Amino acid sequence: MSETMAQRLIHPAHAQLVEAARAERRALVRALAIEADWRFHDGPEWAARYWAAFGDLRRDVDSAPELRLGAALAPRSGWSPLAPVESDQARAIFRALLAALHPQVAPRAAAADTEGLWSLAVRAYRGGDAARLRELLARAQPNAAAARLPDDIVALRSEHDRLVGARAAVDRRLAELSQSFPFNLRDRLDDADWVRRQRLGLRQVLEFVAPPRRRSAQGDRQQVS
């Protein structure tokens, strides 16, 4: 009997630890996929929608880098060039590539990726190239073996703990992003009443900070007389 098989049969925590590590890996893949969506597709789209709604009322574009970014992206109203069905397919393929190639999800597979498949996958996903993603997924199939969880109980426990820490780090990044522009507006830009109130508030601010209007010379003469 091999040592690996003996560990599986003797150590009572092996099966539970495998399931826990798999669950952590799935959660990490899901969190990283959400982060990629936000950074590459949803965030720029939300920024463009914000500037489409408020760009004519903002005068502080040069005061913050994120506002300059939003202004630059504003003309691109439809960020993703994919149709809805194709977009869903591209997201599913990218998530499969992420599970097989991402350095935080599968470090051994990433180390064995001599072709730079992960970098190519990120570039294709960022550009909305679904055909390229399908091609890369086929090329990444041999990396699946290196992405398997270790059998050794000590290595497995170490990998589980690493996955827990990696997922927590991504969750923190998502929490921080959710409080910053434009991610903090994702649930509000569809609310026409909120947009109306915000536009009204911006108009009032502009009127308050605007320099006082100079009276005409004729009006001054009339006031003196």
Image (cartoon, rainbow, N blue to C red):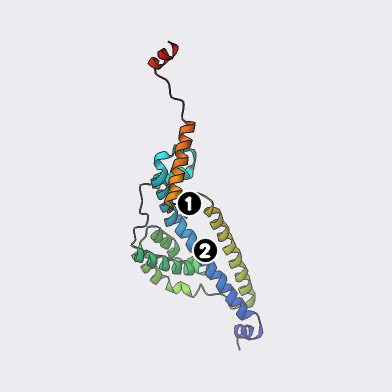
Residue type pointed to by label 2:
Ala
What's the distance in space between the residues labelled 1 and 2, CA to CA? 19 Å
Check disc 1: other Cα within 10 Å, few if <14, some if 14-19, many if 20+: some
Answer with mark 1 or mark 2, whichever residue precedes in sequence: 2
For discs 1 and 2, the disc positioned in front in the rendered view: 1
In the image, taking residue 12 as reference, residue 37 lies left or right, namely left
Residue in the picture at 58% in, 73% down: 21
Q: Can the viewer see residue 171?
A: yes
Label 1 belongs to which residue? 185
In this orientation, which residue lies closer to the viewer: 202 or 46?
Answer: 202
The image shows residue 46 at horizontal and vertical percentages of 43, 52
Q: Can the viewer see residue 107?
A: no
The image shows residue 51 at horizontal and vertical percentages of 41, 45
Residue type pointed to by label 1:
Leu
Tell me the element at label 2: helix
In the image, taking residue 9 as reference, residue 110 lies left or right, namely left
- Relative to 61, residue 173 above or below: below
